[in-house]
Amino acid sequence: MSLAEDRALLSARRWRSAFVILAAAAFAAMATAGALAVPYAIAGFAVVATVALVLLRSARGQNRFAAPIADVEPDDDLLRAVVAGLPDPVVALDRDGRVLAVNDRARRLAPALRQGEPVALTLRIPELIEAIARAAAEGEEQRVVYFERVPLDRWYETIVMPVKRAATATSPDFVLMTFHDLTPLRRVEEMRADFVANASHELRTPLAALLGFIETLQGSAREDSKARARFLAIMQEQARRMARLIDDLLSLSRIELNAHRRPDTPVDLAPIVRQVADGLETLARDRGVTVNIDNANAMSVLGDHDELVRVFENLVENALKYGAAGRRVDIKLGQGSSAEGEPEAQVSVRDYGPGIAPEHLPRLTERFYRVDVTESRAQGGTGLGLALVKHILNRHRGRLTIESAPGAGAVFTVHLPTVVKVHPR
Ligand code: ADP
């Protein structure tokens, strides 16, 4: 029995009671006024009361075969309570598509949803409205995937599930509609597709160069020893570029695989920074840059030694490559505190080169993002260095901040927590 039918039955009972009282009053008034003899008035009232009683009993009888009103309303209260407690956005509808219950999460998706109103007034998604009608008529689960542009691009899958209160019922009593936000999944899928496309493109460029030079060496330059030496040098550089790319890709996927496992070995950052600066001495000399290290006192964090070497190698190498014009790179180690007030180690790498325009800053740690692709390639870059830095720091529960302005150089700062939590034995 639907909510509307319950209400109709309740009001019929009220009307019948009122009718009996009114009839008694009318016969009493007529007898008092002398319009009707008392025995006739009593007999008339008895007939009216009997008819009303018979009607009332038959209504009760009907009620017994269907569901008593007193049982139906708590059922709907229970439905509303269950819908309110579900973790997903959920709307319960009657067979005609009217809202029986809606939880807060669903209201956040469609604020205009109102109990008792047809859902078609609020959700203007024709395929969803059709699916609700089909579910109510055919009693079978329906799934609808749809895309919304306003207020933001979002993907949803809605499951429309017909529900019977009694297993023996032939048609559903109501329909439950559950919304799943597919947007994060779709974004990850898009990112993966972009990543594969970018990685293939990055590998295809040096590969095409290699194939081209091989053909030339097999053909026109076969006997030209000078051209051969020049081409072989270029081929070697292209092959190295491919090897670097594959190395970086493998490192990224390895770090991603371990992302949830925080390193737990205490490591000192000072020797790591010195080791990195020493390793890049040749590059610094080639570029005419002096590297200064300030305050290299012992500073211990929980970390993976090799991954932290990779972080500082990338940052110092970038400063030497892109900031060479400033002729100086300063590395500073210090203690600070995070936004939450937790103590952290802060290592900044500052260059005095051309700097970076503000619109690029938020995107620098994206895979394959470069301010200037040609310059990055000329410097032997893969576009994955800062993405690696970000992933390694995430695994260490740290972060990278970048400050820069065109003409004012750039400061890349690594923040790593220094709190060593003592685990009870
Ligand atoms: P790449 O392999 O291209 O160096 P990264 O991820 O390490 O890739 O850096 C991404 C881009 O950020 C670089 O291509 C460059 O445009 C910019 N960049 C990084 N470090 C600096 C810096 N110190 N000064 C100016 N630009 C920088």
Image (cartoon, grey):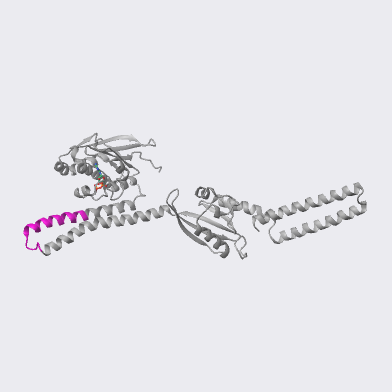
Q: Quadrant of residue 275?
A: top left
Main SS category, magenta section: helix
Residue 27, image x, y percentages: 87, 50
Residue 421 x %, y %: 38, 40
* Displayed quadrant of residue 219: bottom left
Image quadrant of ligand 1 equals: top left
Left or right of residue 291, residue 357 in this image: right
Q: In x, y percent, where is residue 265?
A: 31, 45
Image quadrant containing the C terminus: top left
Q: Residue at x 80, y 59 (%)?
A: 54
* Magenta region: 220-242
Percent from the top left, x then y, of residue 406? 25, 38
Q: Residue furthest front?
A: 35
User: Residue at coordinates 85% horizontally, 49% vertically from top-left?
Assistant: 26
> In the shown orientation, is residue 17 left or right of residue 338?
right
* Quadrant where the image shows the N terminus: bottom right
How many marks on residues? 0
Depicted 147 relative to depicted 362: above or below:
below
339 within the magenta span: no
Picture quadrant of residue 192: bottom left
Residue 143 lies left or right of residue 359; in this view the side is right
